[in-house]
Image: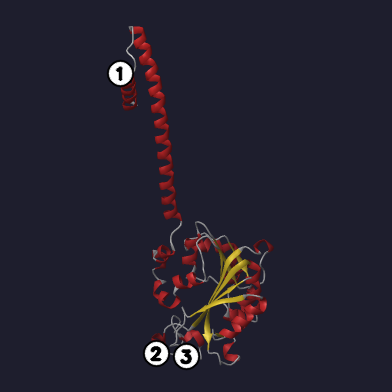
Amino acid sequence: MRVLLTSVASLALLAACNGEAPESVDDAVNQFADTMSEAADEVGELFDEAVEGASELAGSIGDEVAATRDAPTLEQVLADPRREADRARDQYRNPRETLEFFQVEADDTVVEALPGGGWYGRILAPWLAADGEYYGLNYPMPVFEQLFPNMTDEQRTRLAGWEAGFPAAAAEWGGPAQGGYTFGSIPESAAGSADVVLYIRALHNMARFGLLETAVNDAWTLLKTGGVVGVVQHRAPAGETDERADGSRGYLREADVIAAFEARGFVLESASDINANPNDPADHDMGVWALPPSLGGPEETREAMRAIGESDRMTLRFRKP
């Protein structure tokens, strides 16, 4: 304030010196007062402009800081300490390349089928938290009962309440999630709400239990017009028998997956070898569970399975026209 008043007085004196000489003391006082008033108005305008500019600059900086804090990039999410134990599988699952191929953006509404223990959830939940929405999609109870015939009452209760409990689970992954759905029971309020539905290694059990068509239909219901279905699935050889390519070994034939989605009206927009593994013959008696990370076969086979790596996988992008 002292600096501002000094500046006003200086401007007034300068202006007075540039004017006509006063004829009396009263004239001098009046002239000085008029000049002071004019100078104060001018400085006030400059001060207001400076305050407005500083406010705009502060707001801009604040927005940038908030954006950096609240909307991490995909690379930042992939490097997050939450994923410390997950990163060993990045070489096989290629999350950055896969999500980019599926054209997922940070402001999308994304539904992930079978989020499980959160391997992709620890990427999607924090990445979508600021501007997007994240939902899970899980098996109905009859499928859980076939997968886990010896489940306890406690496990049954937990699985039955999966939809309500999913947001809390996602919060631990860096969430939040906005909710959860069950195959075959998509609410009307969710119809046409999603930009992307992800089936990442999620279709083999649906096919195994006769629910592949349900999975395809649910994706159609959830997606907006122009929305994307992203499929990553263990790939059986094209000439594999129906029995060995029914999903019970984890593998499906690529042609069968494509046919199922195209029959509903989806358009196969692109296929990629991002997650392909030509070292996998896909002929293991235990299916994909003979390979890492499960290594479910005999001890003497595990070194050979580790050398193969994880399964050969198709990567398909479908669009709802």
Q: In which quarter of the view is residue 22 placed? A: top left
Q: Please tell me how crowded label 3 is: few (under 14), some (14-19), or many (20+) other residues with Cα within 10 Å.
A: few
User: Image quadrant for the N terminus?
Assistant: top left
As displayed, is residue 310 above or below residue 56? below
Q: Write down the residue under mark 1.
A: 17
Circle number at residue 304: 2
Q: Position of residue 180 (x, y in %)?
A: 59, 65
Toward the viewer: 288 or 71? 71
- Which badge, 1 or 3, is on the more N-terminal residue? 1
Left or right: where 21 falls relative to 92:
left
Extreme-right residue of the structure: 188
Q: What's the distance in space between the residues labelled 3 and 2, CA to CA? A: 12 Å
Toward the viewer: 132 or 283? 132
Secondary element under disc 1, as helix, strand or loop, is: helix
Q: Please tell me how crowded label 2 is: few (under 14), some (14-19), or many (20+) other residues with Cα within 10 Å.
A: few
Q: Position of residue 231 (x, y in %)?
A: 55, 76
Query: Residue drawn at (40%, 63%), measured in percent from left and top?
Result: 76
Amino acid type, mark 2: Ala
Amino acid type, mark 3: Pro
Amino acid type, mark 1: Cys
Q: What's the distance in space between the residues labelled 2 and 1, CA to CA? A: 97 Å
Circle number at residue 281: 3
